[in-house]
Image (cartoon, coloured by chain):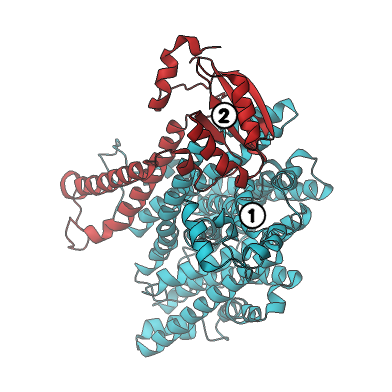
Amino acid sequence: MAIKKFVVGCFDDEAVLFPAVKKVRSAGYKIHDIYTPMPIHGLDKAMGLRDTSLHTAGFIYGITGTTTALSGIGYVFTYDWPINFGGKPHFSLPAWIPITFELTVLFSAVGMVLTFCYLCQMAPFVKKHHFHPRATDDLFVMVIECTSKTNDAEVVGFLKSIGAIETKIENAETGWWLGRYDKDTQPFEQNETALA
Amino acid sequence: MALLKYESQVRPALVDGDKSYHQITEDIVRPIETNPGKLWYVGFIISLALLGFGIFSITREVIYGTGQWNLNKTIGWGWDITNFVWWIGIGHAGTLISAILLLFRQGWRTGVNRAAEAMTIFAVICAGQFPIWHMGRVWLAFFVLPYPNTRGVLWPNFNSALLWDVFAISTYFTVSLLFWYCGLLPDLATIRDRAKLKWRKMFYGVASFGWSGSTKHWQRHEALSLVLAGLSTPLVLSVHTIVSFDFATSVVPGWHTTIFPPYFVAGAVFSGFAMVQSLLIITRKVLHLEEYITLEHIDVMNKIIVLTGSIVGCAYLTELFIAWYGQNKFEGWAFLQNRVNLTSPLGWSYYIMMGCNVISPQIFWFRKLRRNITVTFFMSVIVNIGMWFERFVIIVTSVYRDYLPSSWSTYYTPSVYELGFYLGTFGLFFTCYFLFAKFFPVIAVAEIKHILKKSGENYKEKMDEAEKETPEEFAHEFEHAH
């Protein structure tokens, strides 16, 4: 992946961060990301991120589990090896409910976690660029992506004026290892002059 | 930021002291970054010793067979299955705290969920040992799994409650582990970013999967937690329900009872919370986390203990009533003779169960006792003794004197290897817990930070002025926060 130039601004209070996000967006700067030590409700909306579809994926994995269990047990007990348990029907759905339920949950949970890791590009031994070590401690780190036209000093000044307690300019490769999902970043990837 | 002021002053603070985000990190990560005290080493060595004794006992069992245990003609399930149900019951509190209380938006869960989930996972590992080693030829344990095999294709019986158990427990273990680990990722990243030592940076770097704290990742993380909580809620109820089916779908008097599923689930929550209390009272003291696991947390959990204890008591009485009212001779025998009759050989165990589970927790109706740490710790041990006896009563007193008096067994006491196996699981459990307390944050750092400005003591004090605004102002601000 390409190395790009970023301006980093650190905030130490959500009450300052929220208006700052609004100002940065209305000033027309492109927020690459905001790194926070804990989930901040409403920040995704404030940044204009769309809702995640992870729930939908979970649902699809869930019904896959349901289908697997029902068709698997059905195949075994009505076709492959029907056994007579005290004259009860071979297709004894009520007795299959527990396993069907468990497999629904299992498929959904495992599938969702794997999807989560894939979407966030997270796995053991993955090295990512971290803009600020305190982003996982007590700072809200706003990272603004620069283009060829961006005046770094101006952005730094702007961030300071809206309450950033610490600012820096960094060239970084934000690194994905399995393709992209974020269409917003494409124009900058194609723009060679954006590279530092 | 109307949301931050949303919590009422009536609610007590959940994080005591003058805390900042950084202070929270410091406090919770400190035990990981410093050498453990003498107590840790002593506890860890005792746990390892117990584990060693367990391994020795199990090795004998593998070599010589289940004859090493004092199971006999009518008591095919004795201590082993008692211990299994006991451990799996303990393993219910963690997911209950993390899933059901998340859905109910209970802020206090953040102080205790991490340790409780870890406890759940270790308890389920311990529970799993019993049915596995009870198989005797443990090297054939994989026969329980349905896969296209060379045995003609011989499938397991999907209509059997014992196979449901295999699925329920393995699913429960997997989902609990995933839930727990996903919650740990941000906290492991916190430790990684603070680490000075090379091995620590590497270890937590690998373990945190490269977590960065990106807003998009948090958004997905929240969605994942919520859906996993939604899935775990029926799952946690299903697991002990299915364990109770092991008994309820049989035709043994004393087991063949339709009340079992809710009764087992309530009992599981009851014993699970007791174990959480036992562990956390020690953990908070040793790791100096009194400001995060406060008296408030202990109080709330004691309320759950008295509630579930009373549900369990209600179930006991219902069982007795039905045994009398149902007028079934065999059921009446199992309950009114084998259990309630104090002069019957194992009658005493029924009264230990009643005393520990139903009568003694009633002291928690008093606020003063709920908030007394010594009393709580003592009671949490009593409850777990009681819950162990509940399973013993259900399992052993139902089978030791059944239909045919000539096969009534001799008095059942465990052999030293049976006892050793049980102690061994304690060793396993505490070994895991000690390692967890040393290498992982015992409190969810990010989640505490998340509630700090709502429920932190210092922030609640500052809230007074803000709360004076009119409802209209509040509504206006609330609307614009979104």
Residue B2: percent from left, percent from top: 55, 56
Residue B274, image x and y in percent? 62, 66
Q: In which quarter of the image is the C terminus of chain A?
A: top right
B256 and B230: which is toward the camera? B230
Pick the residue in front: B238 or B131.
B238
User: Any idea which chain is the cyan one in this picture?
Assistant: B
Residue bearing the label numbered 1: B453
Q: Which residue is drawn at 83% across and 47% down?
A: B38
Q: Is mark 2 on a helix, strand or loop?
A: strand
Q: Name the residue under label 2.
A: A143
Give the class, few, some or many, for how many residues have Cα within 10 Å of label 1's Cα (few <14, many ≥20): many
Q: The numbered mark 2 sits on a residue in which chain?
A: A
Quarter of the figure with residue A92: bottom left
The colour applied to the residues of chain A in this rendering is: red
- What label sits on residue A64 in the rendered view? none
Q: For residue B14, what is the image quadrant?
A: bottom right
Q: Residue drawn 25% across and 40% down? A: B153
What residue is at 75 percent from the left and 29 percent from the top? Answer: B196
Q: Which of B70 and B9 is in front in this view?
A: B9
Amino acid type, residue under disc 1 in the picture: Lys
Q: Is residue B453 above or below residue B338?
A: above
Residue B422, visible in the rendered structure: no
Tell me what residue is drawn at x 39 percent, y 76 percent. B253
Which chain letter matches label 1? B
Residue B266 position in % (x across, y down):
49, 70
